Image (cartoon, rainbow, N blue to C red):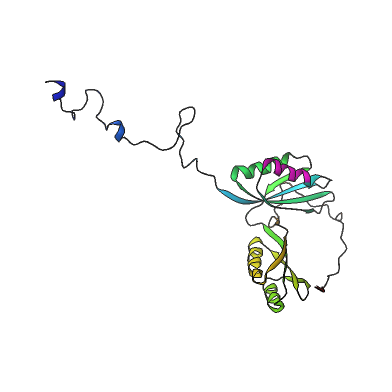
Amino acid sequence: MSGDDRDNSTPPKHGLAGRPPEERPHPEGRRTSQGIRIDPEAEAEPRVRQAVVSALVENEPGVLSRVSGLFSRRQFNIESLTVGPTTVEGNARITLVVEETEPGIEQVKKQLAKLKPVMSVGELDDDAVRAELVLMKVHGDEPDKVHAITQMYDGQTLDAGPRTITVQITGNQSKIDDAIDAFRQFGIIEIARTGQTALARGATPTTPGEEPAPEGTIADEPQKPRTPAQHSDD
């Protein structure tokens, strides 16, 4: 029997019969230089999340410029940055809100910890106590409605005139976002927003190893009288 008369379905003498190469499945993805195939799902864009990072620093001249310079060089996505004194004289707390991937957040903490004035760095848990402040100047055509919205968000009227009203709202990020949306109906002329500041909940230190000032060494700041709402002439 000639070769042309053979049955093509006859299994080969060695191994098992299989589909021709053009009919075989071809896995997706690419290979590394070592020939290892990369899973396309594992190679997908990493998830970005928001993190609040607290850094305890020595309150010396130039510390804020060093921190901001670090973020500029590394191109970290910083949503907000606040700074203020702690109970320990000569120390300050920097609170950062970052929008980064998990490796990016880890890099933020590592690079911060390398700066000379930084003593301690830590990421706050989701249940941390957070707050921010916003000032909004709106048109004063409907003062009663502006006052009602301000009261609804437990805010304060800081300045009121025939043409503009300036209010202050404090709270967490969600409350501030909602308040801004509510005041848009009046026409927001100007806005200033501090960004989040935060402390760990309960007895947990906000930054690792942080200790309060020894009892009796915290300087008491004089109480400032509460300033009533001022009325401008505009």
Residue 150 appears at what percent x and percent y?
70, 72
Q: Given the current orientation, which residue lies at the most extreme top position?
A: 2
Residue 136 appears at what percent x and percent y?
72, 66
Q: Is residue 234 above or below residue 16?
A: below
Residue at left 70%, top 79%? 144
Query: Quick one: quadrant of the N terminus?
Result: top left
Inspect the magenta stretch and tell me whether residue 229 lies in it: no
Residue at left 59%, top 45%? 102
Classify residue 162 as left or right of residue 97.
right
Classify residue 39 as left or right of residue 164.
left
Between 40 and 120, the residue placed more toward the observer is 40
The residues colored magenta run 65-76
Residue 99 visible somewhere in the drawing: yes
Query: Quick one: quadrant of the C terminus?
Result: bottom right
Residue 112 visible somewhere in the drawing: no
Residue at left 68%, top 41%? 74
Residue at left 44%, top 37%? 29
Q: Quadrant of residue 135?
A: bottom right
Residue 115 appears at what percent x and percent y?
75, 40
Q: Is residue 16 above or below residue 188?
A: above
Q: Given the current orientation, which residue lies at the most extreme left position?
A: 1
Between 7 and 203, the residue placed more toward the observer is 7
Classify residue 174 as left or right of residue 210.
left
Q: Is residue 193 above or below residue 3?
A: below
Q: Which is the main secondary structure of the residues drawn in magenta?
A: helix
Residue 124 appears at what percent x and percent y?
66, 52
Inspect the magenta stretch and tell me whether residue 73 lies in it: yes
